[in-house]
Amino acid sequence: MLTLQTVTRASFFTRLDFRPKLVLMAVLTLTAFLWESVALNGALALGVILAALAAGVSGRYIRRVLGLMAPFYVILLLTQGFWAGDMLRARTGQTVLTPLLTLPAHWWLIGGGQMSLEGVLYALNLIAKTLTMTLVIPLGVFTTDANAMIVGLVKARIPYKLAFIFSSTLRFFPLLFAEAQTILEAQRLRGLAFEDLGLLKRVSLYAKIAVPLILNALVKAQTLEIVLLSRAFSGSPERTYLHESRLAAWDYALLVSSALFFIAVLVAYFGWGLGRMGGPLANF
Amino acid sequence: MASIIAALKQASYAYPHTDRFALKDISLDIHQGEFLGLIGPTGAGKTTFCLALNGIVPQFYGGRFFGHVTVAGLDTLDHPISALARHVGVVFEDPETQLVAHSVENEIAFALENLKIPREEMLPRISRALEAVRLEGTEKRHPQELSGGQKQRLAIAAALALRPDLLILDEPTSQLDPVGAQEVFATVRELNRTLGIAVVMTGHAAEELAEYADRVALLVGGKLVKVGPPDAVYGDVAQLETCDVRPPQVARTFYLINRLRGAESPVPVRLAEGMRRLREGPAIEIAGCYAKCVETHSDTSASLLSVKDLHHVYPDGTRALRGISLDIRAGEYVLIVGQNGAGKSSLVKHFLKLLTPTEGCVQVDGRDMREWTVGALARRIGYVAQNPDHQIFNATVWDEVAFALKNRGWRKAEVEGRVIETLSALNLLDARDRHPLALPRGDRARVVIAAVLALHPDVLIFDEPTTGQDYRGARAILDITRDLHRQGKTIIVITHHLHLMPDYAERVLVMGAGVLLLDAPIRQAYHAVDVLRSTYLTPPQAVLLAQALGNDVPLLTPEEVAACVTDKNVKRET
């Protein structure tokens, strides 16, 4: 199961301030969003995966992300491969698509459907986009100490209340997750073998967990509010911090490189069409 | 007389949307450097009392408030909670929910940051607070990595860093094992003595409060019934029992002795004094007592649960069980005890197929666990977890109890019959249409027991069933286990509350560090004091009083000790 983690290995990424990491995450996400080229987005996704591995995010975690996303990727490949033809023709001006596979005409409803190379490439582009956007989060968040993250967010002019909510989510998510596991265990101990149940039955049982989980979360939230008040918390940004957030040379270097990279991406995209659908590298 | 640090003057309070007053006309002064124990049954108003001292009541909740509460000279109605927080530190019951930060040092710094204490001043305050609770060296650790006792000590350190005049601890040990509870009591007492911080502590730990508190206040139904030194409050055993409050066992023992002898001498409330009184008293004819309290129990029935050379290693490398072998026979009432991490829960999880052995084997009814399906096992073994709220996931009491039956594909009429039978047995029929989570905690526990019982399992496992319950609630649940045992069920109970179990359990498994240290009848196990202490358990005071009588008298309860001391066979010495 996917949970929030902190990497144990010290690396270039763990030494960075959270602010340049935030900028890097924003730049990579926007770039992935902008590009329509499977080659460029694939390279970007691969780069993010390698960086995450180098920063200490476990290969097991990345495999789990891929495993969780796999059904959606299959759906993307099928839907875009077979049915994105009209959209691709309209956007690229291409009149004929390259056929890869044609379904027998006598098949009910989908008979005669044709999978095109362009459709598959477009699906792969979407897959690479989502991979970049998904894996840039562990790269930035897992490599940052939660306390440094709050100070970084506040220094980045994010309101303290929002930064605190973000930090509390990181703190209490594992507790709620453990609680959900306990409720599932309780159902199992009343004779429910989840592995033998159909999908619908499973979904209805998962839904039943929501009620006690939300009620318990509300009780916990009220307790937490009382604890915070008892510790003089008012949500006011007028407070001091134990941790300091100072930008070092590497942080400035990353800020500048991220900005330059994004400018280059924009110039290449709008100037020469690099990464644009139908532009150079369109079929790669 | 020390100066007054907090004062309640005719304070009354009702929460919003209710006519019932949680505090009724309370007047009490708390002095600088004082340790005040606050006792009372569930619903007495102890938590409300604590929250009134830091302004949460009524500033956070609203409601109707009358009278005055002042802390360090500040009226709690006129000053914001954040201003009061400088003077009052609070430690709550649940160690999980009250820690808000991602590292130990940040936990302590949190309140200091809110009060705009400069960073340069924070660092020495953090060091001193950690030193005071003996958690030096843990600054960078995540609070989640600490044990229960350490977490509560961290919460105390977080309160301490503010240099409060008053430290309030609301049932701080109720969710801890004996080691954790001991750590918290020792820390609080030391802070109280060395730093002169006034302490208000609520809780059901009668023996510890009698030992440590300067004064004890008895709260019942929102009213302050009695305030005085522990001897005066805990010594009035009859009044405590009327109020559903458990007295220290030593007090109950001497109260019973007085009653049997028709005497009215003062009742000791601390163990050392009780033991001295027994040693100085007349010698006892042991043989007569012994014959009365020793029952022979031989069981030749077949093994129901069997474990052979069981080892379990968790994925993180923790060796939870190391070569456990034991048999539990049908109809036994078995108590499993040991410190946190001793392997108790890991052992029972093997009976439930929630864990699989790393080495060794587990059998139910002579069949290897691998041969059991989840459904078949649930019909054979029922499990009631520590927190009933984690086992409730239906919208009504009826649905909760019917859940397992419906999933087994029973017909509607069969389900109805079984649910009515089960709810009636547990006196829950009137609550059939209510949401289980809207019921009081004791009733929620009964709903879970009913839901498990609906399948008519032969074995019932109760994991810490008395945690968070007051004396009456704990006895009510244990009485259910006794009824079930009398019906022929096999009962397994895991608990730290040894003093509650002599009236129920027959056999005790003492575990420590994944090893079975002792497997013996309860009388023998409770008197193996060294073995119990090796796994950080404290034997009930009645056991220690019995040992003070000498000659290895295996008495277990205040009733037995009192009966023995007042027996006609007493050999008078001149």
Image (cartoon, coloured by chain):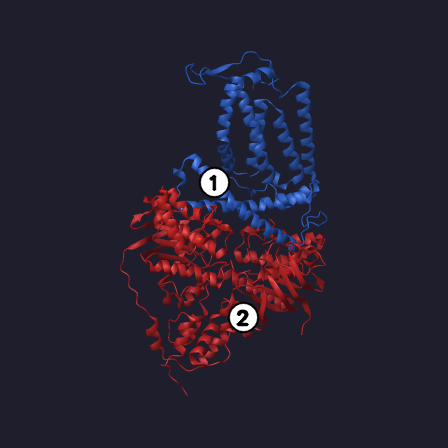
Chain colours: A blue, B red
- Please say if A248 is above or below B568: above
Give the letter of the chain under mark 2. B
Q: Determine if residue A15 is in view.
A: yes
- Please say if B555 is above or below B262: above
How crowded pointer 1 is (Cα within 10 Å; few <14, some 14-19, many 20+) is rated as: some
Measuring from the top left, give residue A266's x and y in whole percent. 68, 24
Pick the front one: B159 or B308 = B159
Alpha-carbon span between mark 2 and mark 1: 49 Å
Label 2: element kind? helix
Give the letter of the chain under mark 1. A
Label 1: element kind? helix
Pick the front one: A10 or B407 = B407
| Tag 2: amino acid | Glu
Answer with the quarter of the image where residue B373 lies.
top left
Pick the front one: B264 or B31 = B264
Measuring from the top left, give residue A98's x and y in whole percent. 51, 14
| Callout in the foreground (2, 1) | 1
User: The C terminus of chain A appears in which quarter of the rendering?
Assistant: top right
The residue tagged 1 is: A206
How crowded pointer 2 is (Cα within 10 Å; few <14, some 14-19, many 20+) is rated as: some
Q: Residue furthest top?
A: A95
| Tag 1: amino acid | Tyr
Q: Say which mark, if any, is on residue B211.
A: 2
Q: Determine if residue B343 is in view.
A: no
Pick the front one: B396 or A191 = B396
